[in-house]
Image: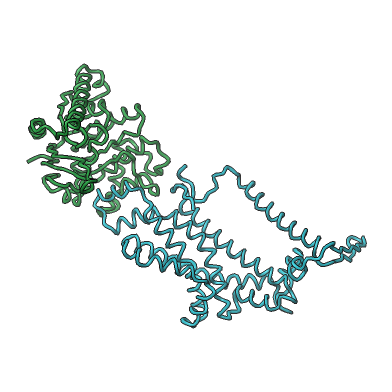
């Protein structure tokens, strides 16, 4: 059925059902997590007065699994509490620190995403115009993604010095690949008869690109943008590590893992913040897609 | 010289060497200003290929193809014809009126003029109220009418139509045939119309060019002397049925010729080809 935004759910599930499914998975994860701790975690006790009733409860799990210990797997409520407690002694509450760090990393990722998307689209356009260049360069484009980012990142930092710039470039490095591949596919995706039509109107190469190839590629590009939005965040976080940038999520991950033993819940809270940042970026792309393509494009499978 | 389309000994061969297929061989055809000519024949007879030679969408292997007295390539670059395919081939991301504006945009017509022209064209195909819709919101027949409006937007001297109603149901097709006749009368455009429907070819055309396959060639040209304007009433006339029978017989004869030629390992009869030239240029 044409006219649906790309990726729109056609399975016939209503929005409410979809939300319920997502919530169900979350509940399942929490149950498994706490279930493991109940069976094999560290002993704990509840010792308090609630509404005038004295509660004195002690739980000793039957097994002892190192993976379920409080150091490896803090209680869910401890992690949630870590968002409200100060991140550093006498400092701001963690949620505020994490939010500021997320915004800092977001700016790096945004620049990286834009650079990567432009590079990917540019390469796609060049390769579509010239099979020769595609044949010559495509293996290197693929090879670039086979190299572990963690080894490339320090090299980029050494090359570009400026911490912020190199982080954006590392982010762009992860972003451009899916965009190149999708652009290449999308720019060739238009109906062959449409190309024949454009030939009949004596359209120039440039008109063929702007009025046929690019509009036809839009659904394909958005599939890539969604993948790249998450990749850009990952790239920015990894890029912060060899830079020693303290202000971003990557810096906080480094810091909280160094002090893991004194507060494992802080690393977990930081990881959750990073995931939420990635999710927000993908969501922003999906929203833009919906606004730009609603009612105009047929569905494209990723 | 007032032939809009002129083919002299035009041939088209796909591939080379052993794998070569002769799609069209020695086509001679001349179409005058304001004529409505149908190309009809079995599948594989090269009627769509012939249309593409005229439109310079594919180059001829040999022979000459002239449109408006110029080589076909030059006519295409001069945007001297409009084309309608079997599928509407509309741009999904453009509204109906922006689709009709597309060829004007490509030829650099200013916006205000484009708008006015698109509106007039949509009125011509009786879709004036649908300019703001997207193609997928329209039925197949309406989409094809948009394609016709788009083809006529540049006011071309020649309209090429490649089985434009082939994918539509019979009732829609008959209605669109009537509408096409009305449009043709009001624009005076020369039309080359590819079809595999005998009644459609007879109803619409001034001449029906009957083709046969392997190799694709013209076997006969039938003059359709039905009175103008063609209306729903035309389809009830005795003469209409006679002409349908004539074209059907011509198609069958062409098929028999081809089968016989194939069996004997012979090519086209030269006498036959000469007669076609004479008829085509008449």
Residue shown at the point (50%, 53%) measured from the top left: A290
User: Seen in the image, is B227 located left or right of residue B235?
Assistant: left
Give the mark count.
Answer: 0
Q: Position of residue A264 (x, y in %)?
A: 72, 72
Residue shown at the point (61%, 67%) measured from the top left: A274
Q: Position of residue B162 (x, y in %)?
A: 26, 38
Residue closer to the observer: B119 or A78: A78
The chain assigned the colour green in the figure is B
The answer to whether one can see residue B191 in this image is no
The chain assigned the colour cyan in the figure is A
User: Seen in the image, is B265 located left or right of residue A171?
Assistant: left
Q: Position of residue B12 (x, y in %)?
A: 18, 44
The answer to whether one can see residue B244 in this image is yes
Furthest residue to the top? Answer: B238
Residue shown at the point (39%, 59%) measured from the top left: A184
Above or below residue A201? Residue B162 is above
Q: Position of residue B115 (x, y in %)?
A: 31, 48
Furthest residue to the front? Answer: B264
Q: How is the image coloured?
A: by chain
Residue closer to the observer: A87 or A46: A46
Find residue B120 and report its image quarter: top left
């Amino acid at each position: 059925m044409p006219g649906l935004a790309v990726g729109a759910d056609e399975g016939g599930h209503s929005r409410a059902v979809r939300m319920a499914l997502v919530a169900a998975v979350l509940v399942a994860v929490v149950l498994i997590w706490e279930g493991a701790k109940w069976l094999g975690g560290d002993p704990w006790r509840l010792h308090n007065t609630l509404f005038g009733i004295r509660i004195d409860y002690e739980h000793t799990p039957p097994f002892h699994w190192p993976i379920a210990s409080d150091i490896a797997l803090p209680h869910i409520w401890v992690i949630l509490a870590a968002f409200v407690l100060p991140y550093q002694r006498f400092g701001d509450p963690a949620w505020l620190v994490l939010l500021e760090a997320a915004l800092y990393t977001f700016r790096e990722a945004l620049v990286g995403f834009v650079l990567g998307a432009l590079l990917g689209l540019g390469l796609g356009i060049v390769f579509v115009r010239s099979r020769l260049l595609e044949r010559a360069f495509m293996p290197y484009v693929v090879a670039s993604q086979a190299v572990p980012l963690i080894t490339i990142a320090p090299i980029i930092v050494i090359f570009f010095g400026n911490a912020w710039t190199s982080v954006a470039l590392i982010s762009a490095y992860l972003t451009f690949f899916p965009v190149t591949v999708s652009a290449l596919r999308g720019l060739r995706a238009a109906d062959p008869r449409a190309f024949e039509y454009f030939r009949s109107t004596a359209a120039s190469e440039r008109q063929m690109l702007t009025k046929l190839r690019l509009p036809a590629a839009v659904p394909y590009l958005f599939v890539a943008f969604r993948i790249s939005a998450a990749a850009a965040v990952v790239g920015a976080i990894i890029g912060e590590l060899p830079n020693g940038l303290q202000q971003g999520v990557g810096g906080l991950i480094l810091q909280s893992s160094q002090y893991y033993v004194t507060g494992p819940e802080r690393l977990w809270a930081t990881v959750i913040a990073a995931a939420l940042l990635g999710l927000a970026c993908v969501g922003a792309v999906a929203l833009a897609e919906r606004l730009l393509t609603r009612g105009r494009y047929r569905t494209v499978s990723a | 010289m007032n032939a809009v389309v002129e083919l002299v000994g035009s041939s088209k061969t796909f591939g080379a060497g052993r794998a070569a297929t002769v799609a069209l061989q020695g086509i001679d055809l001349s179409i005058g200003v304001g004529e409505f000519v149908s190309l009809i024949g079995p599948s594989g007879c090269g009627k769509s290929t012939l249309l593409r030679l005229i439109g310079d969408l594919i180059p001829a292997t040999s022979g000459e193809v002239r449109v408006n007295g110029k080589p076909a390539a030059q006519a295409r670059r001069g945007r001297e014809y409009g084309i309608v395919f079997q599928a509407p081939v509309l741009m999904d991301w453009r509204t109906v009126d922006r689709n009709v504006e597309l060829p004007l945009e490509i030829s650099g017509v200013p916006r205000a003029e484009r708008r006015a022209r698109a509106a007039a064209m949509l009125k011509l195909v009786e879709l004036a109220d649908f300019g703001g819709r997207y193609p997928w919101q329209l039925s197949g027949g309406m989409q094809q009418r948009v394609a016709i409006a788009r083809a006529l937007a540049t006011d071309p001297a020649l309209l090429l139509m490649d089985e434009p109603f082939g994918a539509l149901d019979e009732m829609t097709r008959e209605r669109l045939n009537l509408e096409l006749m009305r449009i043709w009368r009001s624009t005076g455009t020369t039309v080359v119309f590819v079809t595999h429907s005998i009644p459609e070819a007879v109803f619409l055309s001034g001449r029906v060019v009957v083709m046969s396959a392997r190799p694709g060639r013209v076997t006969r040209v039938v003059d359709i002397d039905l009175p103008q304007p063609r209306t729903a009433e035309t389809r009830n006339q005795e003469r209409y049925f006679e002409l349908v029978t004539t074209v059907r017989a011509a198609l069958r004869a062409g098929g028999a010729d081809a089968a016989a030629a194939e069996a004997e390992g012979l090519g086209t009869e030269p006498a036959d080809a000469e007669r076609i030239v004479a008829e085509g240029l008449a």
